[in-house]
Image (spheres, helix red, strand yellow):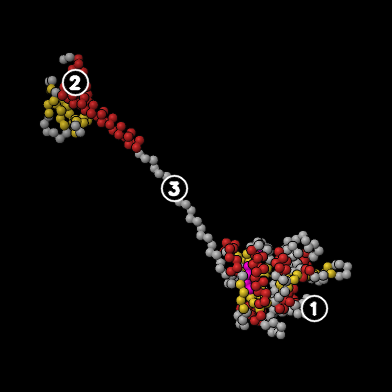
């Protein structure tokens, strides 16, 4: 036997003994046992009942063909895997959902249901239509306003009837720069003036500390109640009473006088030496230097300009006393 043939048989024998799995045309043949008889080899396959005689040359060809087929299949599989990898698309990133904007607060169309002194959110106010927050209505016996004022700021008298008065609801800017609900009772003859003036002041940001009926400070006496209203720096109009320091009927009793920010604009009398006298201690910083403080009414003040334009007079122009808070028609 030649060396070449012997070497080939040894290779085939080693492969068969190791139980090599041969793939032939897509069919897997499990080698279970190999026997040798002379120059022929017998291969027993799984499930076979008879041995199939094959020559070493045939087996060698099968092994060689199978080896090539396996290598080719592996190469094709590798190339296919590379192509698949190359063509796999990148995952699309998920976009974060945009936050849902909060709805704008609904604008108020009226302040009738709000008590005087209520501070309102600026977002609630329709600043393009401020006139809807400045209203006037009659006062009738038995209604809520009548019940508040009868026997206090209003009493039965021969000078003014209930039908001559009007109840106003108005917005104003307080000392914190916020919108605040205000109220006032005035004579029906000045309703238009008052609504126009205070709407303009509100639109321009003019600050008024408080605007309530004097009845909210009622102490049983109109003069004392007026004092408490001034002490609270309250802007007000109607109160049936006599003029301060006089027995004559006040313009306030007719609903034709308005006091604005009375703490910063006090009622002052002067003696022959020029010394000032005033009744409210909280006004002490606003008596002498009338041109160097916030909320002081002077001839350059916006409230002064508007009231004068509408034909009202100012108590600050009087020689003595000087009533800086006071405008009257």
Q: How far apart are labels 1 and 2 at the CA level?
A: 145 Å
Precedes in sequence: disc 1 or disc 2: 2
Front in this rendered view, residue 291 or 81:
291
Magenta includes 170? Answer: yes
Judging by the rendered image, the residue that carries numbered circle 3 is 95
Q: Residues within 10 Å of mark 1 (few under 14, many from 20)?
A: few
**Residues at discs 2 and 3 in contact (Cβ within 8 Å):** no
- CA neighbours of label 2 inside 10 A, class few (<14), some (14 to 19), many (20+): some
Magenta stretch: give its range.
Answer: 168-173
* Label 2 vs 3, first from the N-terminus: 2
Say above or below: 20 vs 218.
above
Q: Position of residue 284 (x, y in %)?
A: 79, 65
Sort mark 3 into few (<14), some (14-19) or many (20+) by Cα contacts within 10 Å: few
| The image quarter in which residue 269 lies | bottom right
**In front here: 75 or 3?**
75
Q: How many marks?
A: 3
Of the two numbered discs 1 and 3 on the same chain, state the one appearing first in sequence.
3
Q: Which residue is mark 2?
A: 9
User: Residue 246 got which mark?
Assistant: 1
Q: Is residue 176 visible?
A: yes
Spatial separation of the CA atoms under disc 1 and disc 3:
79 Å
User: If the image is split into quadrants, where does the C terminus sit?
Assistant: bottom right
- Callout 3: helix, strand or loop? loop
Find residue 85 and report its horizontal and vertical position in percent. 34, 36
Q: Give the residue drawn at x 18%, y 23%.
A: 60
Query: At 65% from the left edge and 72% from the top edge, which residue is drawn?
Result: 192
């Amino acid at each position: 036997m030649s060396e070449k043939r012997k070497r080939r048989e040894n290779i085939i024998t080693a492969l068969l003994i190791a139980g090599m799995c041969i793939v032939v045309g897509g069919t897997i043949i499990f080698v279970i046992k190999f026997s040798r008889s002379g120059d022929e080899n017998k291969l027993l396959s799984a499930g076979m009942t008879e041995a199939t005689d094959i020559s070493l040359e045939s087996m060698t060809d099968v092994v060689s063909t199978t080896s090539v087929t396996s290598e080719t299949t592996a190469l094709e599989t590798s190339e296919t895997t590379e192509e698949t990898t190359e063509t796999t698309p990148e995952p699309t990133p998920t976009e974060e959902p945009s936050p849902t904007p909060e709805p704008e607060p609904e604008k108020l169309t009226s302040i009738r249901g709000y008590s005087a002194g209520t501070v309102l959110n600026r977002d609630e106010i329709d600043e393009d239509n401020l006139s809807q927050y400045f209203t006037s209505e009659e006062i009738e016996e038995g209604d809520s306003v009548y019940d508040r004022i009868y026997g206090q700021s209003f009493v039965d008298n021969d000078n003014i009837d209930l039908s001559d008065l009007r109840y106003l609801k108005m917005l104003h800017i307080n000392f914190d720069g916020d919108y605040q609900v205000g109220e006032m009772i005035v004579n029906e003859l000045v309703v238009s003036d008052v609504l126009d003036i205070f709407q303009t002041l509100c639109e321009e940001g003019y600050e008024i500390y408080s605007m309530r009926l004097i009845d909210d400070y009622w102490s049983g006496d109109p003069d004392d109640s007026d004092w408490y209203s001034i002490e609270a720096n309250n802007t007000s109009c109607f109160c049936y009473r006599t003029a301060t320091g006089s027995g004559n009927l006040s313009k306030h009793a007719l609903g034709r006088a308005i006091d604005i920010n009375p703490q910063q604009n006090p009622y002052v009398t002067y003696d022959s030496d020029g010394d000032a006298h005033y009744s409210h201690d909280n006004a002490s910083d606003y008596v002498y230097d009338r041109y160097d403080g916030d909320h002081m009414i002077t001839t350059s003040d916006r409230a002064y300009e508007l009231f004068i334009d509408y034909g009202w007079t100012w108590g600050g122009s009087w020689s003595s006393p000087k009533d800086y808070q006071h405008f009257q028609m």
